[in-house]
Each structure stands twice: as structure tokens, then as C-alpha cells.
Image (cartoon, rainbow, N blue to C red):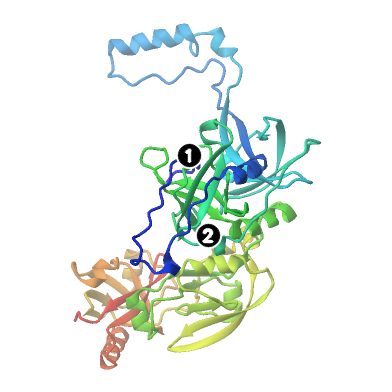
């Protein structure tokens, strides 16, 4: 995935099925006769952004790194003599007196406030820049100051001061955009200047592993290097996305571009404007996806929600009574259809708000009230690095070994604690061997893992595991849910019961 964005206009062909084959309600609307009027209106609000950064400079007299050759090679002596004569080694004055070089990067942005001169762009466009210049549509150059940036969503807010008249555009509702809707992308591809491309929304809610709040709009409008930070418009001239990345094996546009939705950007930009940084809501849980096996083992209909793998001590979730093993189905009235939606919903919730959280716990729906914390404050205080800690000592267990579910299980003895580098307070049932080809092996369980819970109940000995597995079989369960700890990291694993 490349952090890039829009380019050369491409012809778009709208194919309509023969009459009678497509219901009238599903037929595509006629393509606009021209985008010229809309483009003319929007182009003055889109800017080019040039950022410069001082390139690393060799210290005076420092020789450039020589190519590597076998010892004694004649090329080694040749290159040594060359660098000595042309700078870097034995007192080459031209090299020592050269001016510090600067690297320049080009990107795009757009004006959202003509009165105060606020400009939105991508963070990666201006990251580590020593100097930022905003270039207006009429080629006017204005130095810009950085108001704030956000690495997690790759957004940045700039401010320019000028008596030059500015044109601004506003955010639209990105949630209202549907797959197939027309969009315009405007930006500065390859440093060419204001360029307009057209396309449609190809997909929504794309996760491209760019950050924790990925929810990209995908488009086939041509996006290329230099379009990063430029706006994507709907047909009403509203910004519904910020062009940020493309998928391209070649580095050029192949019709797969990604834009940050306006509804995410609007909140981030407002916080950068007010505070100079973001202030996100924070729950204090580590979560994982609910697989069909996990849902079945919990008696939950459908693999939905976010499974709480661990709870941060002292965090909002811990103080409200949310437990590891809970499945969050709703947060502040919003459905959590999949795991990755929860961080976004929490982040957008006002800090300090008492939010109702609906969880699935031991076969029942429960609702708890959570006072939303602040993510940035938790990061600064170091709370996010804390691991769940239980100071209770593990009761003495006989070193009995049991083969179950493709696992060899035993109680934790002092020797095994030392062998597997377990914490002094570690409790549970130790996995000492995993049978190859079993579901346990396929799920990534390995020797040294410790089973803390089975079916959301604590286990202290192999006999506890065996008893709970037998109980699950009697209840006609297809799988059991294990809570596994590995070097302080907790995760849930569902194992099918077709293994003895």
C-alpha cells in the first residue's frame, strides 16, 4: 500500500443493461454531461503543498561509504583514490564547503476556513518538515504554520496568514455516500499542479492496515503521487474524503485509491483546531474478533461484536466492571457489528460521558455504564503499557499430566515455571506439548502457553480442564473457549470438541 493520491483524467464508460433486465429502481443515473462547472468552482479551494527538510550532511572530512569489494581487489584502491580526489577523504575542499542540501516533497490540501486560513492535508505530506509552503491555485506562495497533526488518521491542520482572498470548501456527509456514487478528486499529482479526475465510490469501510481507525472510502478516480491530502468531492461540491493512499504494484494509478471519510476527518480537524492535538475517547480494553467458533462456544447468535481479551487496570472499563470474556455488542447506543468498529466508536465519544455498554456475559445480555476516558492522557501516563496483574499465588498443584484436545497439560511446578520463564504469580494450566495437525496447532497454541480460563471459568489444574470439556460435551457444545496467556499477552481461542 502506498501513501499517495489523484492524476490524469480517465474516460469513464457507463454500461446500462438492456431494458427489462434490471428493475427501474436499480438502473444507474445518466453520467453528468460535464464536470467543468463544478471543477471551476472547486479548484480555487484546493492547494499544492511543498515541504522541505534538511537532508543529513556528512561531517567535515568524512569519506563517503566505499562500495564493498573483496580484500585486495584493484577496484578497492581505485575507488579510494577517486573519493580522496573528489571530496570526503584527504582534505577535499569542495566537499567540505558544500551547502547543506534539502529534500522536498509535494502534496495537496484544501482550505476549510477562508477567514482564518486553515488548510487540511495528510500528516505524511508535512511530516518532519522544516518549512511548509502552501501554493494557491493562482500560484501564490504562502508560508504555513503547523497547527496540529494526528498520526493515527494521517491528518494535519495548517494555517496561512495572507491578505490574498481565499476560497474555502466544507465537509459533507461521507456516511451518505453509496457505492457507485460519482466523485471528483482534485490535487497535485507528480507536482503538476491542480488536476481534476473523476470516478465513483468503489467500496466503503476498507481496512488497509494504515492505522487503528481505518474506514477508508475506495475510489477508481485516478490517484497518484502528489495527490495525498487532496479532497474528494461529491456532486454537491462537498468534501466527503481526503485522498491518502493507493494500491499499486507499479507506483502509478491502477484505479484503486483510498480516502479518509469526511466524518472521521471533521472530528479530528475540529480537535486539532481547538487543542492542537486530538482528544479521543478511551475504554481501556484489548479486544479481538468474534469468530464463528468463539460465538458458538459463548452461546452467541452470529459472530458479531468485540471480544474483550483483557482489561487495563485502572482504566474506564475496569472501573465500570467490564470483564475479560465479555462481548461488546453496543456502545453508547451504536451497534458493534465487528471488532474494528469499537475503537472508532469509542474514539468519537466525548471524554467524560457516561456511556451505556451492552455486553454478552455468560449467556446473558447485560448493560454497564462506562465513563469514557481520554486516550492521549492514558498514553502519556503509561497506562496502556500495563498488563493485567494478579498477585494471588498459584495454589500448589500435583505435577499431573493430561492429554486433551491435542494438548499435553500439566500443573505449574517451580521447575516448569523456570523452564518456560513464567511469572512468579502465574496461575493456570500449562501447555507442554501440542500435537501437530490438530485444531490446537492450527490455532497457534504452543508449549509454554498457559490456559487461564475455559468456558469463562477459571482453571487451576488439568483435571479442571477435563471436567469442563466433559461438561461442554454433555451440553452438546461444538467447541470450548480457552483464555490463553503467553508472556503476559491474553487472547481467546475456540477449540472444536471433535478431538479427544
Judge from the rendering whether residue 121 lies leftward or rightward of residue 339; answer left or right.
right
Residue 489 makes an appearance in the image: no
Q: Which residue is mark 2?
A: 213
Residue depicted at 20% across the width and 79% down the height: 499
Q: Nearer the viewer, residue 77 or 29?
A: 29
Task: Find the residue positioned furthest to the front.
Answer: 19
Q: Nearer the viewer, residue 178 or 284?
A: 178
Judge from the rendering whether residue 412 lies leftward or rightward of residue 320; answer left or right.
left
Q: Is residue 239 above or below residue 285?
A: above
Within 10 Å of disc 1 (Cα), the crowding (few <14, some 14-19, many 20+) is some
Q: Earlier in the sequence, mark 2 or mark 1?
A: 1
Q: Is residue 294 above or below residue 104?
A: below
Residue 213 makes an appearance in the image: yes
Q: Nearer the viewer, residue 406 or 420?
A: 406
The Cα–Cα distance between marks 2 and 1, rounded to whole angstroms, is 30 Å
* Coordinates of residue 400 in the picture (x, y in percent): 25, 81
Residue depicted at 27% across the width and 86% down the height: 466
Q: Which residue is mark 1?
A: 9
Q: Nearer the viewer, residue 452 or 48?
A: 48
Which labelled disc corresponds to residue 328? Answer: none
* Coordinates of residue 119 in the picture (x, y in percent): 68, 45
Residue depicted at 47% across the width and 80% down the height: 326
Residue depicted at 59% across the width and 64% down the height: 383
Amino acid at each position: 500500500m502506498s501513501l499517495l493520491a489523484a492524476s490524469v483524467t480517465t474516460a469513464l464508460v457507463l454500461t446500462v443493461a438492456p431494458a427489462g433486465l434490471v428493475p427501474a429502481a436499480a438502473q444507474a443515473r445518466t453520467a453528468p454531461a460535464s464536470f467543468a462547472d463544478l471543477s471551476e468552482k472547486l479548484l480555487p479551494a484546493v492547494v499544492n503543498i511543498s515541504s522541505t527538510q534538511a537532508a543529513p550532511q556528512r561531517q567535515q572530512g568524512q569519506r563517503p561509504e566505499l562500495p564493498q569489494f573483496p580484500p585486495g581487489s584493484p577496484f578497492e584502491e581505485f575507488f579510494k583514490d577517486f573519493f580522496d580526489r573528489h571530496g570526503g577523504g584527504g582534505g577535499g575542499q569542495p566537499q567540505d564547503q558544500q551547502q547543506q542540501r534539502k529534500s522536498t516533497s509535494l502534496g495537496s490540501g484544501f482550505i476549510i476556513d477562508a477567514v482564518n486560513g486553515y488548510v487540511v492535508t495528510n500528516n505524511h505530506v508535512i511530516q518532519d518538515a522544516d518549512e511548509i509552503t502552501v501554493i494557491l491555485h493562482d500560484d501564490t506562495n504562502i508560508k504555513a504554520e503547523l497547527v496540529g497533526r494526528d498520526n493515527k488518521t494521517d491528518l494535519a491542520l495548517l494555517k496561512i496568514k495572507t491578505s490574498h482572498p481565499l476560497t474555502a470548501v466544507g465537509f459533507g456527509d461521507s456516511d451518505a455516500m453509496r457505492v457507485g456514487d460519482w466523485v471528483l478528486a482534485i490535487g497535485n499529482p507528480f507536482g503538476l499542479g491542480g488536476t481534476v479526475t473523476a470516478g465513483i465510490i468503489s467500496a466503503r469501510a476498507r481496512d488497509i492496515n494504515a492505522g487503528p481507525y481505518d474506514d477508508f472510502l475506495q475510489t477508481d478516480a485516478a490517484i497518484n503521487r502528489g495527490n495525498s491530502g487532496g479532497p474528494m468531492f461529491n456532486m454537491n461540491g462537498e468534501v466527503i474524503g481526503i485522498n491518502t493512499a493507493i494500491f499499486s504494484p507499479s507506483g502509478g494509478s491502477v484505479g484503486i485509491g483510498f480516502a479518509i471519510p469526511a466524518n472521521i476527518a471533521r472530528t479530528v480537524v475540529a480537535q486539532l483546531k481547538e487543542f492542537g492535538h486530538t482528544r479521543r475517547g478511551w475504554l481501556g480494553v484489548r479486544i479481538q474478533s468474534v469468530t464463528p467458533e468463539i460465538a458458538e462456544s459463548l452461546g452467541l447468535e452470529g459472530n458479531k461484536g468485540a471480544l474483550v481479551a483483557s482489561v487495563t487496570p485502572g482504566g474506564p472499563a475496569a472501573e465500570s466492571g467490564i470483564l475479560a470474556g465479555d462481548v461488546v455488542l453496543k456502545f453508547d447506543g451504536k451497534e458493534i457489528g465487528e471488532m474494528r468498529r469499537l475503537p472508532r466508536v469509542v474514539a468519537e465519544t466525548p471524554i467524560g460521558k457516561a456511556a451505556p455498554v451492552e455486553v454478552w456475559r455468560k449467556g446473558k445480555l447485560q448493560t454497564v455504564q462506562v465513563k469514557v476516558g481520554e486516550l492521549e492522557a492514558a498514553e502519556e501516563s503509561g497506562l496502556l503499557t500495563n498488563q493485567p496483574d494478579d498477585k494471588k499465588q498459584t495454589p500448589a498443584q500435583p505435577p499431573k499430566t493430561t492429554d486433551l484436545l491435542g494438548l499435553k497439560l500439566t500443573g505449574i511446578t517451580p521447575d516448569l515455571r523456570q523452564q518456560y520463564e513464567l511469572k512468579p504469580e502465574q496461575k493456570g494450566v500449562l501447555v507442554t506439548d501440542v500435537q501437530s495437525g490438530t485444531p490446537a496447532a492450527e490455532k497457534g497454541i504452543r508449549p509454554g502457553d498457559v490456559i487461564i480460563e475455559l468456558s469463562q471459568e477459571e482453571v487451576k489444574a488439568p483435571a479442571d480442564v477435563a471436567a469442563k470439556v466433559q461438561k461442554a460435551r454433555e451440553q452438546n457444545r461444538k467447541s470450548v473457549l480457552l483464555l490463553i496467556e503467553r508472556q503476559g499477552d491474553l487472547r481467546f481461542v475456540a477449540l472444536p470438541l471433535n478431538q479427544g
